[in-house]
Image: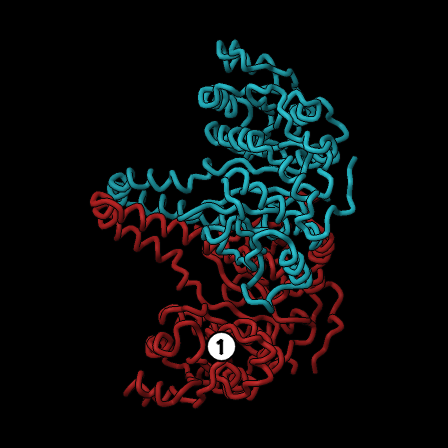
Chain colours: A red, B cyan
């Protein structure tokens, strides 16, 4: 494909295919993000994939917006449906159609809040990998006090090889370089300690490959660095990445749940909470998960963004913005050129899809 | 050893060897926990391993307590010293002497805030494994709203086999059963999802072994369950366990750091914080890491507890209490009998140390 990855359908603005049917909370939660997004991005077109009647019922007159088009689809992939089943058995599901629209170049990117495994499998099958990349990786941004950090992989590859971890590093570095205008993002490898002696064989081989690459590789990171802002990109296997992401969410939920319980228990507590509310609102701006919604599937011949399954509408809008940003910055094209020119220090890898 | 694992030195009370020299913050931070602990546990004796003069200088007249004995040692294993180096080159280091005292049955347990890798290597070499257990696992308790959860392994075994994960499950289950008086702790296996189809080969084989065991195995847990209180024990490989623990700490630190910054920024914020302080203090009771200090190294022929490296004194005292509890409940003896009687469904494993 040689750089056509992110060719825009409509040069005057991007087109994004939106699977409005999938996710834990359904179409009624996703649709309010549509007018919000269109107001903020007047040049962008959206292809809404879903039940035409429901969409029209919920959006009303807003459906007449020339920047909106509905691709009718009533079939939905369930959140717990096995990916292989979804791939083979549901050619007309909203998630599948949204990905197909990218393949057919009717859209520059697609966004879904659906089943991650199914989205991965379908995107991989339909769009195929960029040459030089073995498998897609899930990348998301974590908040930090000073700056955020992009982490990959968050669950697509449970046992990646050192060569794949290097590919993740290249992809993560290109993404951050593109969307944050950083010329040489600081890339770290997740380990159980920062000392040279730490880690298993995979880690030791991966750090050698990363050191030999042209990336700005700065060494090992630990779990706490997910939220420290010390690195721009942290690369890890999908098992520990997924577990770390979810355990962090669990820790945050515990603190907030405990705060709610403790402040709610007494009249004094409820007064203190009311008094603190304006300050808490400021805090929420920084760490609200909604502001960090939108994990991207990197390494594909196209842009695929996964919204959190239970994203509220503003949060889903943030995932749409992630997709738009990646279109505007031509992320797949940048990854392609970096993998092609051999940031790995050994040129293209063995795998060529086309 | 056949059940002698936790034979008490002094039947009228336990004796604990305390490495007072190791850790990020040194002897002056650790020693204040000693009188605190002795007040709370009048039957327990402590063998303080460290620089006699410094200990006497810091503890003063409290050294005359008949329940205290000092084992002089000035050598210290550095926090970043390679474990192999510490094991071979420092036979008189405080950490080493504390473990030796357990081997010599002069102490029922030892506690150190030192280098985890060195403590693991030395404890393993000196005390050896219980028959039926291949390697030690690091186990710690995580707070939850309703109840806490014990997680293992947290970094001793980066690539455990399914058989080892089963051993972890047995050990964790016995620990919780002993210290929390729960007859059948709910044991879960950490995975990237709770559906049957999720996970890699290791996970799939491990879940088979766990299902075939006599444990109360309840299926897969995800990272968020570290803090949900839904399970009593979560078993995982040491790489993802370590990363998840540290990333959760990182997330908690981000929230608290942000709260400090945001509340400190304005006069209103500082007033709101002062107003909220009594409620925050109640919250801290539940999730203060100091209350959860004291990870235990399970599977050894003796009780070894690791305190957090930068534990303050009360926090170190909590690690001493963890050790005492394990002595009183004879945790190694219980693990031995469970592994011996074949909770794994196949009797003893191949490895016998003695």
Q: Quadrant of the C terminus of chain B?
A: top right
- Between B319 and A328, the one lying in front of the other is B319
Question: Can residue A192 be seen?
Answer: no
Q: Residue at x 62, y 81 (%)?
A: A125
Disc 1, SS: loop
Find disc 1 in the rendering and name its residue.
Answer: A78
Is residue B289 shown above or below B193?
Answer: above
**Residue B20, image x and y in percent?**
58, 23
**Residue B264, image x and y in percent?**
32, 43
Quick check: B350 left or right of A99? right
Q: Residue at x 64, y 16 (%)?
A: B71
Q: Residue at x 65, y 43 (%)?
A: B338
Q: Residue at x 58, y 76 (%)?
A: A83
Q: Residue furthest front?
A: B341
Chain of the residue where label 1 is placed in the rendered structure:
A
**Residue A186, image x and y in percent?**
58, 55
- Between A339 and B199, the one lying in front of the other is B199
Is residue B339 shown above or below A153?
Answer: above
Quick check: A299 left or right of A53? right
- Between A17 and A243, the one lying in front of the other is A243
Quick check: B186 left or right of A339? left
**Residue B106, image x and y in percent?**
66, 20
Is residue B282 shown above or below A342?
Answer: above
Q: Quadrant of the N terminus of chain B?
A: top right
- Between B14 and A7, the one lying in front of the other is B14
Question: Can residue B16 be seen?
Answer: yes
Judge the density around disc 1: few (<14), some (14-19), many (≥20) Cα neighbours within 10 Å: some
């Amino acid at each position: 494909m040689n750089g056509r990855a992110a060719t825009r359908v409509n040069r005057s603005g991007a087109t994004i295919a939106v699977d409005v049917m999938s996710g834990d909370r359904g179409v009624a939660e996703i649709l309010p993000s549509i007018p919000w997004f269109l107001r903020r991005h007047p040049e962008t077109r959206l292809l809404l994939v879903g039940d035409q009647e429901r969409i029209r019922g919920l959006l009303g007159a807003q459906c007449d917006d020339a920047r909106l088009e509905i691709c009718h689809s009533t079939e939905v992939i369930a959140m717990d449906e096995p990916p292989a089943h979804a791939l083979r058995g549901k050619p007309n599901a909203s998630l599948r159609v949204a990905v197909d629209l990218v393949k057919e170049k009717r859209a520059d990117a697609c966004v879904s809040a659906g089943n991650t495994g199914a989205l991965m499998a379908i995107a991989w099958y339909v769009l195929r990998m960029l040459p030089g990349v073995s498998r897609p990786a899930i990348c998301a941004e974590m908040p930090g006090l000073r700056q955020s950090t992009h982490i990959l992989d968050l669950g697509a590859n449970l046992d990646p090889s050192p060569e794949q971890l290097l590919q993740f590093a290249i992809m993560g570095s290109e993404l951050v370089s593109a969307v944050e205008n950083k010329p040489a993002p600081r890339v770290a490898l997740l380990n159980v300690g920062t000392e040279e002696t730490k880690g298993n064989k995979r880690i030791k081989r991966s750090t050698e490959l990363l050191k030999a690459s042209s990336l700005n590789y700065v060494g090992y990171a630990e779990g706490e660095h997910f939220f420290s802002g010390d690195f721009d990109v942290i690369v890890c296997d999908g098992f520990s990445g997924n577990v770390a992401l979810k355990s962090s969410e669990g820790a945050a939920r515990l603190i907030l749940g405990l705060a709610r319980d403790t402040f709610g228990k007494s009249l004094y507590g409820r007064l203190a909470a009311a008094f603190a509310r304006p300050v808490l609102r400021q805090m929420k701006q920084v760490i609200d998960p909604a502001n960090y919604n939108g994990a991207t599937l990197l390494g594909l011949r196209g842009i695929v963004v996964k919204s959190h399954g239970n994203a509220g509408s503003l949060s889903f809008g943030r995932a749409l913005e992630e997709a738009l940003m990646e279109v505007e910055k031509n992320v797949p094209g940048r990854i392609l050129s970096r993998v092609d020119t051999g940031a790995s220090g050994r040129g293209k890898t063995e795998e060529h899809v086309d």
